Each structure stands twice: as structure tokens, then as C-alpha cells.
Amino acid sequence: MIAAVLSLTILGVFCGWLLGLAARYLRVETNPLNEELQQLLPGVNCGQCGFPGCAGAAEALASGKAPVTLCPPGGQPLVQALAAKLGVTVDAASGPPLLAHINEATCIGCAHCSPRCPTDAIIGASKQIHGVIQDACIGCGLCVEVCPTECLQLRPATLTLKTWYWPKPALSFGG
Amino acid sequence: MKLFDFWGGVHPAGHKHLSADQPIRIMPPPARLQIPLQQHTGLPALPVVKVGESVCKGQLLARGQGAVSASVHAPTSGTISAIGDFTAPHVSGLPLPTITLDSDGEDRWLDREPLPDPFALVPEQIAVHIAEAGIVGMGGANFPAALKLNKARQAKVHTLAVNGAECEPYMTCDDRLMRERAAGIVDGVRLMLYALQAPQAVIAIEDNKPDAIISMTAACHGDPQIRVVVVPSRYPAGSAKQLIQLLTGLETPAGGRGTDTGVLVHNVGTAYAVHRALRQAHPLISRIVTISGGAVAEPQNLEAPIGALVEDLLGFCGGVNGEIAKLLMGGPMMGQPLPSRQTPMVKGTNGVLALTAAEAQLTTPSPCIRCGRCVDACPMGLMPLEMSKRARHDDLDGALAFGLIDCISCGSCAYACPSHIPLVQYFEYARGALEAQERAEQKSKETRRLLEQRQARLARAEQAKVEAAAKRLAEKQRAKAAKAGVGVAA
Ligand code: SF4
Ligand code: SF4
Ligand code: SF4
Ligand code: SF4
């Protein structure tokens, strides 16, 4: 009995030491810029950018392999923030953001969508019609993929008197 | 009284003769009124009536909610036929929550009990009555009047400036009100002074309204607290900050409020509404509105019920002649272009203009020649050409640095610009884009919080699972040990 305990303990200590050595000598150098970029990204790891999670995206950004517009959930503020960090210029204007919308007529209350939402924007219990809290939805589209009835769709956010503003005058000359 | 001067300004053609000489005509309520629940700065009012309910004239339809809001009353008697969305009197044509009232044609008042003597009340109570009557700034500011009075009393304002300057071209509703109902305005001014606990009021009128000056001077004759002051006609003399500068020589600090100078500005129409609310228990359900412009058959001023459609107003003035090149709510300098005639007038509507092509002067912009006329015209001492250039290149911070926040959107710069550059639209765009940016930043902050919250929740669930598994394991082992123990014992 004692021999068994001892041998396992020694094995454990040895493995720990090996891991410690590995951490010291085989460490991957992370770029401080990577970390900063990752701080800016939403951290949802939704994969929409085509890179393995936000860390992968940050790496691609840092090495110039991806444009600052890569992250749909981040929206325009993220584009601006990334552009500022990386010192690149982008066009500011873009359409209204996309938000998830549930068609109440066809929702079957399967509750597949709500657990996937990174911001808990979908409300509704099993066998009940679900709804999206527009203020919380970031339009990442993760819920859309799993909805079996296609009642969940991304739509441009509806304008209200609070969010509408005059468009920039379109003039035919430069200046 | 010694007058001071304000910087800049322009002299646009007045066009006031179109409507200035006809007396105010009272427009009976049309068959259907569309009464928006948000006719003021702040939160929309909450309906207190149901669809199908019949209401009396003056009855409360929706109550103001929260700190900044205003109540809405029935402009006539009839039945509530809908509570839903209806086109707002706004250039976007977007909807606002609206109560639809079908008139029964009787115009039957609610039982009213006017106060025996408002001056017997404490000042705060006057403000309460003003708030209950749903009164907002009627010069177009739309800010709840009672709130403005209360804040000014707390700020110990020393002068109430009553704005009868009416510097917008075409507009004559304040002029007619001062000519015809001077006594009511002066009574309203006295009530507001009492509510403010301020020692003096000056009524400012531009020198292009001699009849209004005569009737107002007569109405406040013998009152040591109230004086009429004649100001030169120059746009935008009727803008609060410029009026204060004219009267006191004080400039409102950048980003500050008018009351920082010790002066509170209220429109003559607001004073009249206060008089009616306290003396006749008459809530704000109608107002004087100028219907003018070359395309209107009979330009004039109407006392029209809130919620009447632009279509009805134009119809009551003999309809339109020929084609409307530009339909505006408000004056040509600061008015709101309307996409449709199917939109209601509201508490802050001072006029509806139907302009012909010749009046509207739809011009094509050309490049800036850096002539500096916009700089000379700006009453806020800004550099419109620099601000618009930055807005054009989406350099919003640059526009801010050139004083975007202080721009009062008066349109003097665009009026003066020989290249017809839509300067104000650039500023509105930049302001809107800045607000959108702020909202987006707020949202991404909120998103981060939600993400963290969710991650914490998932971690807790995971933790609970691990603990449950450990417990099960421990129990299993205990059971095993017990069995083994039994075995050993046996
Ligand atoms: S798109 Fe769907 S999953 Fe993504 S935030 Fe909106 S509701 Fe949630
Ligand atoms: S996945 Fe689709 S059908 Fe299922 S609850 Fe969500 S919205 Fe309704
Ligand atoms: S008035 Fe017009 S053309 Fe002249 S400097 Fe200003 S923006 Fe340029
Ligand atoms: S609109 Fe703004 S920038 Fe133009 S004149 Fe008026 S205050 Fe100055």
C-alpha cells in the first residue's frame, strides 16, 4: 500500500518538474500587440472571422493577415478601435448593424438558440415562443445556424427617431 | 434700457406681410386628430385611455412619465379610435406612438374649475399646475416648461426674458398673439415671475412689429416689474443665447445653459399657455400656427387643435395653389422639411410653410471658395467652413474641436454661403454620427459585461458539476469502504 502511494507521488513530482522545464524552455513568444488586440476583440470566439477564436484573430491582425473589418460582432466601434491601434485608415460609414429577429409565427420553442447566445440576448423557455432583446444582441449570428425552422434571422436594426440622423450631403464635387 | 449686440447674424427677406395682417382664425377640430405621445424633450407620455373610450375636451389622454416628460390632453371631445404608430412631423417620416381621436363634433369640455386665485398658491404649486397642463416651450424648444421654471428658480435667475422677437421669416404667430391677446400674455408673465420668484421680466420684440410693440406696452403699463424692449430685426435675435446677449451683453459659456447668465428665456406663446392653464384650467390643446408660403391660397394664422394634420391646416386656408416645391414645419431657416402632408401639428409647431419653387430657391451647391462669409454670419463665432470640411471627411473629433457642440443650427452660415453648401446638414450629420458612436461604445461596454456575466454563470455551473461528481465519487467510495469493512468483519 505504502509503496504504491510513494511511487505515484514520486511520479507526480517528476511530471510536474518536467512540465515546469517545458514551460520555461519551450515557451511560445507572444507579441504584446497580440494581447492588446485580443483585449479589444469581443472574446466570444464565435469563429465568424474564419480564424480559430479571438486569439487567432488577434494574431492574424497583428501580422497583417486580416483586415480590421474581420469581426462582425464587434461592429463599427471595433473597426475604429482596431484601425486606431494598428494605425490604418478605414471608411467610417456603413449600413445599420444587423440584429437577430425571431418570427413568432414559426418559432416552435425548441430552445436550441438561447444556449448559444454569447450575450444571453435570447429569452424564452422550452416550448415557448422565444424573443431577442435587441439591446443585448450583437448580431453574431450564432443562433441563426441552429434554428430548425429558419424563423431566426439577422435583419438590419430598425431606425427610430432616436437613432435616425441626417445623412452626409452627397455633393458631386471634391473638396 | 441699454441694448448690447451679438456677433454675426443675417437679414433674410421677412415675407411676413403674407400672414401678418389677417386676424387669428379659430379652426374647428377636424373629424380625426392624430396626437403624438412625444411632443416634447424626454420620455413619451403613457396613455391613460383605452381604444373605444369616449373622452371630453381637455381630458388627460396620456401622463408624462419620469423626470423629463409632458402630459397630453384631448383637443376636442370624441372617441379614441386607435393607439399606435403614426408618421411623426419629422423629415425622416418615421413613426411615433400616437393616439387617434375621432371627433364627435360637439367639442364638449370636461367640467373645469379654474383656480380662484393662483397667487394664493406657493410658487412650486404654480409649476405643478403648469406641468399638469402639459405645457412645453412653444418657441420650438419643446422642453417641459414647469421643469425649466423650477430649475431656473433653483439657479436664482434674476430676469425672465419673454421672447417675442420672432426672427424667422414668414412666421407671424407670436406677432398676432401679441397684437390680439396682450393682456393674457402679460398675465402669464406675472404668473411665471411668481413661480420663478424673480424680480423682473423684459418682453423682447423686434422693431419690425410696431403694432405688437404698442399693444404689449399698453398691456404692461403701470407694472414696475415688466418692460417691453425693442430689439433690432436681425436673424437670429430670437434664439435664446443671442437674445440674452442682446439684453445683458453676457455670452452663454461654451457648452453651458442660458440660465448660467441669470436670465431665463420663455416664448410669448408659452406665457399665454400658462395664463390659460392657471386662469381657465385650459390645458395645452391648441396653439397659434402660421400657415404661409406662396403656395398657400389664403395665408394666415390659425388657432388650431394639436393633432390636426398638415393636410387639414392647408385645407382650412383655402388649399394650395399650384405645386409645393418645399413643405416645411417651422420657418425656412430652422424648419423641418416634411415628407408628407399626412402628419400632425404638435405643441411646438409654430408654422407650416408651403413654398413655391421660386421661394424655395433649390440651388445646386458648388465648391467652397473660402470667402469667409459663413464665419461673418455665425452668431456663435464659429468657423462653419472648417467644421463642414471636417464633417465631410468624417473627422468628427476635428469638427468638435472647431466648436460643433456650440452650433445652434440657426442656418445663418448656409444662408450667407455664396456656394450654397448645405452647411447645417453637415453639422447635423456630424452630431448624429457622434451620438451613434457613443451609443455603439455604450453597447460594446454592455456586451462585454454580458459576456463576462455569462462566462461567470457557465463557470459556476461547471463548478457545481465538478462538485456533484466529486460528491458522488466520495459516496461510492464510502459505500465500497463500508462493504469492505463488512467483508473484513465477516
Ligand atoms: S445574433 Fe443570436 S446569438 Fe448572436 S448575439 Fe444576437 S441573439 Fe445572441
Ligand atoms: S431555435 Fe428557432 S424555433 Fe427554436 S426556440 Fe430558437 S427561434 Fe424558436
Ligand atoms: S460661405 Fe460658403 S464658400 Fe464662403 S467660406 Fe463659407 S462655406 Fe466656403
Ligand atoms: S448653423 Fe451653427 S455654424 Fe452655422 S451660423 Fe448657425 S451657429 Fe454658426
Image (tube, coloured by chain):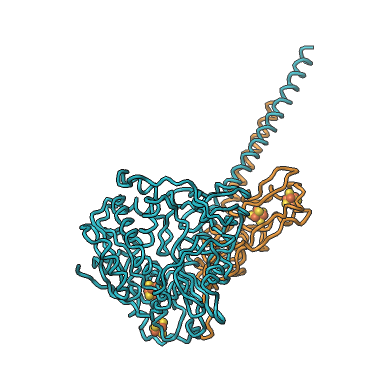
Chain colours: A orange, B cyan
Please give the name of the residue rendered at 25% of the width and 67% of the height, measured from the top-left corner.
B229
Q: B431 or B13: nearer the eye?
A: B13
How many numbered marks does the figure carry? 0
User: Residue B297's x, y, as percent?
Assistant: 51, 78
Quadrant of residue A47 within the rendered picture: bottom right
Q: B109 or A63: nearer the eye?
A: B109
Asked whether, in this view, residue A37 is left or right of residue B288, the answer is: right
Q: Furthest-top residue in view?
A: B490
User: Residue B363's x, y, as percent?
Assistant: 49, 85
Quadrant in which the N terminus of chain B appears = bottom left
| Looking at the image, residue B42 lies above or below residue B319 | above
Please give the name of the residue rendered at 62% of the width and 46% of the height, measured from the top-left corner.
A18
User: Residue A148's x, y, as percent?
Assistant: 78, 53
Quadrant in which the C terminus of chain B appears = top right
Q: Furthest-front residue in view?
A: B106
Please give the name of the residue rendered at 42% of the width and 79% of the height, measured from the top-left corner.
B414
Quadrant of residue B479 within the rendered picture: top right
Q: B180 or B286: nearer the eye?
A: B180
Q: Is residue A29 visible?
A: no
| Looking at the image, residue B409 lies above or below residue A38 | below
Q: Quadrant of ligand 4?
A: bottom left
Q: Is residue B487 visible?
A: yes
User: Residue B417's x, y, as percent?
Assistant: 41, 83
| Looking at the image, residue B322 lies above or below residue B328 | below
